[in-house]
Amino acid sequence: MPDSDCPVIVWFRDDLRLADHPALCEASATGRKILCVYILDEKSKGIRPLGGAARWWLHGALAALRRQLKAKGGALLTFEGEAPEIFDQLVRQTKADSVFCHHRYQKPEREQDDIIAARLKERHVTLFRAHGTLLRAPDAVMTKSGTPFRVFGAYWKAACALGDVPAPRRVPSHLSFYDPAPLTSLPQLDEAKLLPTKPDWAEGLRQNWEPGAEEGEELLQDFVAHALHRYDRGRNEMAADGSSRLSPYLRFGHVSPRQVWAAASKVPGADTGVFLSEIGWREFAWYTLYHQPELTSRNLKSRFDVLEWRRSTADLQAWQQGRTGIPIVDAGMRQLWQTGWMHNRARMIIGSFLVKHLLLDWKQGEAWFWDTLVDADPANNAMNWQWVAGTGIEATPFFRIFNPLLQAEKFDPHGDYVRRWVPELARLSDKAICAPWNETEETLRQAKVKLGGNYPKPIIDLQQGRERALAAFRKTKSSE
Ligand code: FAD
């Protein structure tokens, strides 16, 4: 018989919210006192440490969750170290007999959860895992022959055919919390260390983002009320805030996909369908990562393993710093550096430029995004980089090379996105701002632009870059 004075543990991971939290609901249904914990585990084998921008976000996210819990009379304990060791100590000290959490879908995390479950079982403690971070569990959507889908359209059709998405669950009406005071002997997470110092590069992040479930919910409601009805068009206008900007809130689980689904589904119309299918792409990315864990580290199309990527630190740095001399590319990269986020269209343009025009390995782009995005997400990031590179399943064909000038003309027709992020070009006309190198000395002088001076000359001739990429691609064909 469980000792009713002993707590149950809720282990928060990428689900830093109280609403629609099945694990918290199950824990509260026991009627026992709840101990809420978060563990930053960057030591266990295979678990990838968070990037800098995500660490900054996590700092605010933990503070926000702590505030939410405090308002309900609870607290959040945060630890740092190997999760299996920490649980050994936690259950020994608290005599907890169960731990509630959500499934994680990445291979190293799944394996770690299995290890923890086995170790806890030896102590007669149960690890309950609920599905709480996706609309559908990855093994719930399979082809008729029982294999995973490899094409988004078929996957999404089958996922939607499973029936209505269950409604999000409310915050449990009764929550009572365990007093965590005596647990200070465990390795505490020094949360201040998540923030950058020397230099403190996070000013732009602070200006643009407020982590937390309440902020995520507000953003969701605002998007549904004001932008969802024109999402299909608005999401591609680079200078406008036409998309939801929910990505970091989904990444850290401040809002759940079910909450997003429920809020958006109330708005009738085709734009809602387009938006929900983007939530579907998030599902598909996690689905793919679950079934093909090598997504993050290897080309899913092995034919590309022979592709001879260039190595150029100078080109990589120019790209990272937004100093390639191609305005639309530099605008995207500077938006990323300053705000920790980038418009989806810009992500596709700068991704294609890195992988095709510069012929640098997509993994270098993935790693830079991992470090600089507040929404850096193992599945979405890797799947999209493989999509851009043409190396993934259902990826854009390698020979489809985005022309950054045409993209700028189409999706930033007045140059407003470039003007905002590359202010040294702001005085150029709408046409000239796409490709300043085509302008006369006099036009540039009047706009106070000096190529090779206050703005770089292009680091590559776009046509030559395109041909080089196509030639490298053709060579992979001959190796088939
Ligand atoms: P909205 O358009 O409002 O979409 C709503 C939500 O749907 C997003 O928040 C996101 O969770 C999901 N979503 C939208 N587009 C995609 C997509 N193409 N693939 C998967 N899910 C999607 N997204 C991340 O969340 N994390 C990443 O690390 C990430 N890396 C990317 C890397 C590259 C090279 C590219 C091309 C795209 C990447 N994306 C990533 C996908 C997409 O760019 C962002 O999800 C989107 O721009 C976030 O803005 P939003 O919340 O306003 O999106």
Image (tube, rainbow, N blue to C red):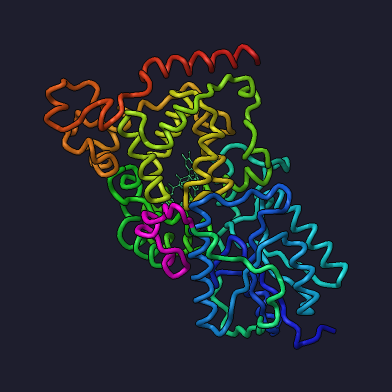
Expressed as whole percent of the image width and height from the top left, the position of residue 422 reads 28, 39
Is 332 or 272 nearer to us in this picture?
332
Measured along the vertical axis of the image, is residue 162 above or below residue 297?
Answer: below
Measured along the vertical axis of the image, is residue 445 above or below residue 252?
Answer: above
Identity of the residue drawn at 70% across and 74% down: 9
Q: Is residue 117 magenta?
A: no
Identity of the residue drawn at 65% across and 79% down: 28
**Is residue 59 among the parts visible in the rendering?**
yes
**Is residue 258 among the parts visible in the rendering?**
no
* Residue 115 falls left or right of residue 337: right
* Magenta segment boundaries in residue numbering: 196-217
Expressed as whole percent of the image width and height from the top left, the position of residue 184 reads 68, 76
Quadrant of res 37:
bottom right
* Residue 308 falls left or right of residue 266: right
Query: In the image as oriented, which residue stretches furthest toward the front?
Result: 198
> In the picture, which quadrant includes the N terminus?
bottom right
Expressed as whole percent of the image width and height from the top left, the position of residue 383 reads 56, 40
Identity of the residue drawn at 58% across and 19% down: 308
Is 172 or 15 nearer to us in this picture?
15
> In the picture, which quadrant includes the C terminus?
top right
Is 252 or 140 nearer to us in this picture?
252
Measured along the vertical axis of the image, is residue 410 above or below residue 242?
Answer: above
Quadrant of res 3:
bottom right
Is 33 or 192 nearer to us in this picture?
192
Expressed as whole percent of the image width and height from the top left, the position of residue 200 reads 43, 55
Q: Is residue 209 magenta?
A: yes
